[in-house]
Image (cartoon, rainbow, N blue to C red):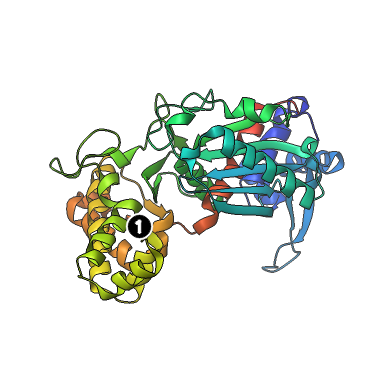
Amino acid sequence: MPRWSDLSDNEMTLLDHVFWSTHISRDALANGAGFSKSRANAVVAGMLDQGLLEATGAQQSTGGRRAETLRLSRSLGVLLGVALGATGLEVGVLAPDLELLAHHSEPADVRDGPALLMARVRTLMRELLAKCKRRPGDVMGIGIGVPGPVDFESGQLVNAPLMPEWDAYSIRDDLRADYAAPVFVDNDVNVMALGELWRMQRGLQNFLVVKVGTGIGCGIVCHGRVYRGANGSAGDVGHICVDPAGPRCHCGNLGCVETMAAGPAIARAATEAARGGQSALLAQMLAERDVLKLQDVAQASRAGDVVANAIVQRSGALIGQMLASVVNFHNPSHVFIGGGIQRIGPLFLAAVRQSVYHRSLALSTRHLEIQYTPLGERAGIIGAGVLAMQETLARRVAA
């Protein structure tokens, strides 16, 4: 594994461009980095000799000689990614080009506290590395997404409503005994936004990623970079008020969109409808499962249940109401929606779109696209790998 601090500026520039591209040719690399072809070829030749880059074959021919493509070398090591949600966790081992080599996901409850969950994370890391025939010393960087506001420089959660026991807990120190690699921690939706930024090879400069699950959060990409704000709480849109007379949120305020439209609110509304005899299908599901969850409402909605559809549409309308303000303020080109809400399908998206387009300024929505995140359930783990690799390169951490 190289010492990043020993690499030249030219080498770091090309490494960064290769990372943010998918099987890039030498000519495209030279153009993207602003290098002459001869200069780029000379630097690339040296990096191939050092084992920093490797050839991946030739592109499809468009006439003439097929161009050879490059990627970060597998000999550099591996990345560890962790996507921690309110009700689940996923751990993955990724190659430097973010191919997912091994991963595992399972239910988890962040309210169990950091000691229990981080012990499980460390166990999964060891097992997955062994599965890939890798050692802790092969790890280049570790990226972790968590469902709460993070002070990015310290890597610590700050007053996280969904995980109060994690306040000021040092995840970095927890992993330091096992890994010499640098550890980077960020809010889970910022991490998802990084994943989308990488997927699009930084082709979109201004967009939002909204996660709707147990909570509601927003990752903001502004001028091609994740915007975290002064203290790391940018994008905490779940606590925007959509009804001053609404129910009390766990944050203490009334009518937050999170408490009225996130996964638990959808499940709660479905449970009330089932018990009130408004939906035979939801009542049957409740009798069979004792408790209804977001995925049950999604299943009922896809089956055409009128009550489930109404609950989904109300949630989408409230989230769209909140998003309209954000769209007017930020003027993004795209809004990508992820999290457990994706299981519902097009009905939820339609409700969000209708509400946003109705409430936003015409200029803000003229070219706005609202869709589910293309990375789907892998957005968190891919984004964690992006975080690990991007920050490891950017900070030139000595391995």
Residue 237 visible in rendering: yes
At a point 73% along the width and 43% down the height, the residue shown is 126
Image height of 234 relative to 204, above or below = above
Q: Residue furthest left?
A: 245
Of residue 103 and residue 252, the one placed in the foreground of this image is 252
Residue 35 visible in rendering: no
Q: Locate residue 274: give its quadrant.
A: bottom left
Looking at the rendered structure, the kind of residue marked 1 is Glu
State which quarter of the image contains the C terminus.
top right
Is 28 placed left or right of 168 in the picture? right
Rendering coords of residue 196 (x, y %): 50, 50
At a point 31% along the width and 67% down the height, the residue shown is 347
Is 69 placed left or right of 84 in the picture? right
Q: Locate residue 392: give its quadrant.
A: top right
Image height of 346 relative to 15, above or below = below
Rendering coords of residue 50 (x, y %): 85, 38
Rendering coords of residue 127 (x, y %): 73, 47
Is 156 placed left or right of 17 in the picture? left
- In the picture of the structure, the residue carrying the numbered disc 1 is 369
State which quarter of the image contains the N terminus.
top right
